[in-house]
Image (spheres, helix red, strand yellow):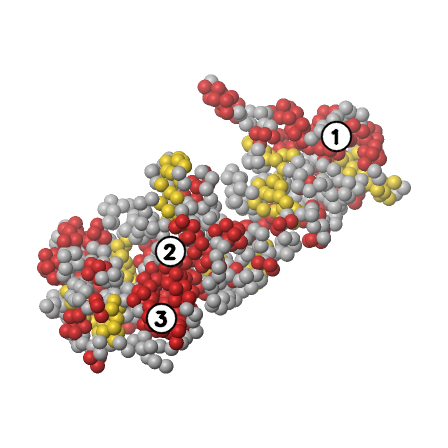
């Protein structure tokens, strides 16, 4: 089944301009939402089984429902566009080619929850996308789709586009909030700092991924039942996979939740380069534990991937064939996390750096036999002992390579060279 | 008031108590670095992980509030392993420079390693080099970035307590470094506190650095005499190694916790104001003017000479300038000897300062004396310093006794002071350090500093707090109360005070504001003037008379 929702119109020229977006039915869902009771909008999203597509897979409607109804404080919507998970590039397309789809989703969410100020936090390197989103916000303002009394409904909303400064940790929602407040991007301790209770500027805050909110207009336009019928039992609709690596046709690929990994690779991404066999697949960004060729029938939704011992994550799929050295991949990933650890918590600050150095030595053929076990031990010692999940996000994949491809690490130690690449 | 179980012991704690504080109540220690009860919680060191039954993973004790029915374990195998692992992480990039680190002996990395670490090193990598090693970051503090464990206590102190925000943590991951913000230096009225709260050798005190190994130090509780706030302090002194620190005995002052006065902090003015104790200007022997010059004499001779001059003066010709630097016990004896026994009327303790002292809305008071309140209550504000000096200048006084004050450097008119000090026939100076005023004296009686005697001060809020003798009086100096006792005997009075507690008991009977107070009741945190014992208070409340009693 090939059904596209958020990426359906990305090929239409100038779809990122308001007039073209409207020609293709844009902002009709907003009109429909504004005619509904706010609670009914949230309910519709709940029933659609739309889940958070940034990585957690938490039901979006339920998240909106956590915001207290009668609070004297301001409420905020924050869009997480700090797309930093290695391998992930889906939000980049949605921001660049369909910014109004996101804005429409934001207005609907804000209306449902009673929010009058929203922020879009976009990673600093997405300079082109930031310009386009800013222009889209201006267009929407001029057309009365933002600001006061939107489409005569009496509902007000302002949107601010914020450029990040280049830190992976600012994609972690509380790190993002700190950064947005003008501070260093240090994640906050949960509890008590659940954004729904104590979020941006200490106020209740909805924080959703770009793709999640981009789905919202379609849920409202076509109804919860339609959306829920597309995906799996718990994960409604589609998601945009960002596929890279040794496939013939890498790129973004929107498919229903739960599509088997094999179908994704062989039917939608043109199969493997040079018809070589699949050796390993990162199914949901670099933080997700690696899968082997034994897992090609895994259903690519949050539940299926969890059951396979990995996770849905950001939907970034990195496919690797049998020419790939797993020690190299593992060391590469470890280097990334050592570079991106915010340095707040001891186990992550010291552990990510240490394990990276050990893995680099193994890769360079400069290790002792006990180093492999030591890498396992250091990775395990970081897990579950820090404020945010970066340490776990580093330790889980590292451990998955060290256990699933242990023989390659041992070979590197013993022979001081690679059994895959030779030399 | 939730009730919970910690290590098998049930305890009921106030609302919002965290697990570290609750554990203290049952005698369990949860080790920690970044947590400090006087600062906000950062939760970053991860040393205080404990096991809570039914919780999915270990929780940090600092940020986990006690909840009804919670069952907490502070030393299961899982917890002990986590501690060991966190310590290993903290130490992998920490330099092995304990032998040359001034923090050694009071370093929490050392202490916890011995208690919870003790593992074989598995760190084979090169340690990370950081930029600043032994770099002064302000007038009081030296920074060593490699020793820093990034707990951020100092950063939070500068944000939350001094509110000056000079410090920050720069860069990410294991390259993170503590530093001052560009163009700033750590220079605020409370900067020394960051050294106290630094659990490791990253921030050391420029004043104390390399003066003495901390294990040679002894400590004594005291009260800062620097202003009328009365901050609780500890005097750290060294008597065992007289060749250290150029022979100085008192080597540093540290704040002592008192929730009613100074919490965990003291100001820099107080912290570094101790140097006069072992200064070269200390008066070591009694001196008397003979044949146109000052001569060292024995105490007996000096007291005899003083008594003769005082006896020769009729009460109207006798002037006394007591000092709010003195203890209540001493001020009480001054009143008793000079006012009650000798009938002097020209008695005062207040001398205006040259300029208004610095003060702020936190700890520092403008009145730079520790016991103005006590002196007022004891009733030594009889005349005025100016009137007494005028009398002296007009040669209406035959003897003037000055305690501690340096009038030459005060707010009094310079020419009046000069005329008075030269005009009076006999000038008896009782103090610890030479000054322009002692220069003019005919008799000098050397007295002990606050660190060399015991007694009490009453701070500006009327809290009476005890000081204790840390080091013996230098040379032949004596505490003023002892000098007054001996002087009274030289004057033929039958005085025999054996100690300050003896004097305080009499003072408490005699001066209404001090009623009901005893050294025992003062304890180590002090008690306020107008104290009503709990049992009596109950009775007064019953009769509706408490307010009336308090008002007196």
Numbered badge on residue A409: 3
Q: Residue at x 88, y 40 (%)?
A: B290
Image quarter hosting the N terminus of chain B: top left
Kindly indicate whether the residues beneath marks 1 and 2 are on one polypeptide chain: no
Q: Secondary structure at mark 3?
A: helix
Instruction: Say which residue label 2 marks.
Output: A386
Numbered badge on residue B485: 1
Q: Which sits in the foreground, B120 or B527?
A: B120
Q: Which sits in the foreground, B542 or A394?
A: A394
Where on the picture, by quarter, is residue B342? top right
**Foreground: disc 1 or disc 2:** 2
Relative vertical location of residue B131 with respect to residue B44 in this rendering, above or below: below
Precedes in sequence: disc 3 or disc 2: 2
Mark 3 neighbour density, 10 Å: few (under 14) some (14–19) many (20 or more): many
Chain ID at mark 1 = B
Chain ID at mark 2 = A
Q: Residue at x 46, y 42 (%)?
A: B28
Q: Is residue A376 rendered to the left or right of residue A100?
A: right
Chain ID at mark 3 = A
Q: Is residue B128 rendered to the left or right of residue B487?
A: left
From the top left corner, tell me how far across and down residue A139 is, in percent. 22, 67
Is residue B168 visible in this depiction of the protein?
A: no
From the top left corner, tell me how far across and down residue B227 is, in percent. 60, 42
Mark 2 neighbour density, 10 Å: few (under 14) some (14–19) many (20 or more): many
Numbered badge on residue A193: none
From the top left corner, tell me how far across and down residue B136 is, in percent. 58, 61
């Amino acid at each position: 089944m090939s059904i596209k929702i958020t990426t359906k119109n990305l090929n239409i020229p100038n779809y990122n301009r308001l007039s073209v977006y409207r020609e293709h039915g844009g902002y009709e869902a907003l009109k429909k939402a504004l005619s509904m009771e706010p609670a009914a909008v949230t309910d519709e999203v709940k029933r659609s089984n739309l889940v958070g597509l940034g990585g957690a897979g938490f039901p979006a409607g339920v998240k909106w429902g956590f915001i207290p109804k009668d609070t004297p404080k301001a409420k905020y919507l924050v869009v997480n566009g700090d797309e930093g998970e290695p391998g992930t590039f889906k939000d980049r397309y949605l921001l660049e080619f369909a910014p109004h789809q996101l804005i429409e989703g934001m207005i609907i969410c804000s209306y449902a929850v009673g929010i009058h100020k929203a922020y879009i936090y976009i990673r600093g390197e997405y300079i082109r996308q930031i310009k386009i989103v800013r222009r889209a916000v201006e267009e929407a303002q001029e057309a009365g789709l933002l600001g006061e009394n939107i489409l005569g409904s009496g509902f007000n909303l302002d949107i601010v586009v914020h450029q990040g400064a280049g830190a992976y940790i600012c994609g972690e929602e509380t790190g993002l909030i700190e950064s947005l407040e003008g501070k260093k991007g240090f994640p906050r301790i949960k509890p008590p700092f659940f954004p729904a209770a104590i979020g941006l500027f200490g106020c209740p805050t909805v924080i959703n991924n770009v793709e999640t909110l981009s789905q919202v207009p379609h849920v409202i336009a076509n109804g919860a039942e339609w959306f829920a019928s597309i995906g799996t039992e718990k994960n409604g609709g589609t998601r945009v996979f960002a596929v890279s690596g040794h496939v013939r046709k890498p790129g973004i690929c929107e498919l229903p939740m739960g599509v088997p990994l094999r179908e994704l690779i062989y039917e939608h991404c043109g199969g493997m380069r040079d018809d070589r066999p699949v050796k390993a697949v990162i199914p949901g960004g670099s933080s997700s534990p690696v899968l082997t060729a034994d897992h090609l029938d895994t259903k690519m939704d949050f539940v299926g991937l969890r059951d396979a011992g990995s996770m849905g994550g950001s939907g970034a799929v990195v496919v690797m064939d049998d020419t790939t050295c797993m020690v190299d991949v593992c060391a590469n990933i470890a280097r990334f996390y050592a570079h991106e650890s915010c340095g707040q918590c001891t186990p992550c600050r010291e552990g990510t750096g240490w394990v990276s150095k050990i893995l680099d030595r193994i890769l360079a053929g400069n290790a002792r036999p006990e180093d492999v076990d030591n890498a396992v031990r250091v990775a395990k010692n970081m897990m579950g002992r820090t404020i945010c999940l970066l340490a776990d996000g580093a330790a889980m994949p590292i451990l998955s390579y060290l256990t699933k491809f242990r023989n390659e690490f041992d070979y590197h130690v013993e022979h001081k060279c690679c059994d895959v690449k030779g030399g | 008031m939730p009730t919970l179980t910690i290590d098998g012991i049930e305890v009921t704690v106030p609302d919002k108590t965290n697990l570290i504080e609750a554990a203290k109540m049952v005698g369990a220690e949860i080790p920690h670095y970044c947590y400090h009860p006087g600062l906000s919680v950062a939760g970053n060191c991860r040393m205080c992980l404990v096991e809570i039954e039914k919780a999915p993973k270990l929780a940090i004790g600092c940020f986990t509030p006690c909840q009804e029915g919670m069952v907490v374990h502070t030393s299961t195998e899982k917890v002990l392993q986590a501690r060991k692992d966190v310590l290993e992480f903290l130490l992998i990039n920490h330099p092995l420079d304990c032998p040359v680190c001034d923090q050694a002996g009071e370093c929490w990395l050392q202490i916890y390693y011995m208690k919870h670490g003790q593992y074989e090193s598995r760190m084979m990598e090169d340690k990370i080099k950081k930029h600043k090693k032994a770099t002064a970051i302000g007038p009081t503090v030296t920074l060593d970035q490699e020793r820093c464990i990034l707990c951020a206590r100092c950063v939070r102190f500068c944000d939350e307590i001094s509110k000056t925000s000079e410090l920050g943590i720069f860069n990410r991951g294991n390259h993170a470094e503590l530093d001052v913000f560009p163009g700033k230096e750590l220079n605020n009225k409370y900067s020394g506190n960051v050294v106290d709260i630094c659990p490791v050798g990253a921030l050391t005190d420029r004043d104390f650095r390399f003066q003495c190994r901390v294990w040679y130090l002894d400590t004594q509780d005291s009260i800062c005499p620097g202003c009328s706030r009365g901050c609780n302090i500890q005097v750290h002194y060294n008597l065992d190694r007289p060749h250290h620190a150029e022979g100085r005995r008192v080597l540093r002052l540290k704040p002592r916790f008192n929730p009613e006065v100074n919490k965990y902090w003291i100001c820099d003015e107080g912290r570094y104001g101790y140097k006069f104790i072992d200064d070269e200007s200390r008066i070591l022997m009694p001196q008397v003017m003979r044949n146109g010059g000052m001569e060292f004499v024995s105490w007996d001779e000096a007291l005899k000479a003083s008594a003769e001059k005082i006896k020769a003066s009729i009460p109207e010709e006798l002037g006394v300038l007591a000092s709010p630097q003195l203890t209540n016990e001493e001020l009480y004896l001054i009143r008793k000897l000079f006012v009650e026994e000798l009938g002097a009327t020209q008695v005062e303790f207040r001398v205006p300062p040259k300029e208004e002292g610095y003060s702020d809305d936190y700890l520092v008071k403008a009145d730079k004396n520790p016991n103005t309140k006590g002196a007022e209550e004891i009733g030594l504000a009889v005349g005025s310093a100016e009137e007494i000096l005028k009398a002296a200048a007009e040669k209406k006084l035959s003897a003037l006794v000055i305690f501690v004050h340096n009038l030459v450097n005060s707010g009094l008119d310079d020419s009046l002071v000069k005329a008075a000090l030269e005009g009076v026939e006999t000038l008896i100076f009782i103090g610890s350090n030479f000054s322009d005023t002692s220069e003019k004296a005919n008799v000098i009686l050397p007295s002990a500093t606050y660190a060399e005697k015991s007694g009490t001060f009453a701070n500006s809020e009327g809290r009476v707090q005890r000081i204790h003798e840390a080091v013996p009086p230098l040379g032949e100096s004596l505490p003023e109360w002892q000098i007054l006792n001996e002087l009274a005997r030289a004057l033929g009075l039958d005085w025999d005070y054996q100690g300050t507690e003896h004097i305080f008991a009499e003072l408490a009977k005699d001066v209404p504001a001090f009623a009901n107070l005893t050294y025992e009741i003062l304890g180590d945190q002090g008690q306020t003037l107008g104290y009503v014992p709990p049992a009596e208070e109950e009775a007064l409340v019953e009769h509706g008379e408490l307010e009336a009693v308090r008002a007196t």
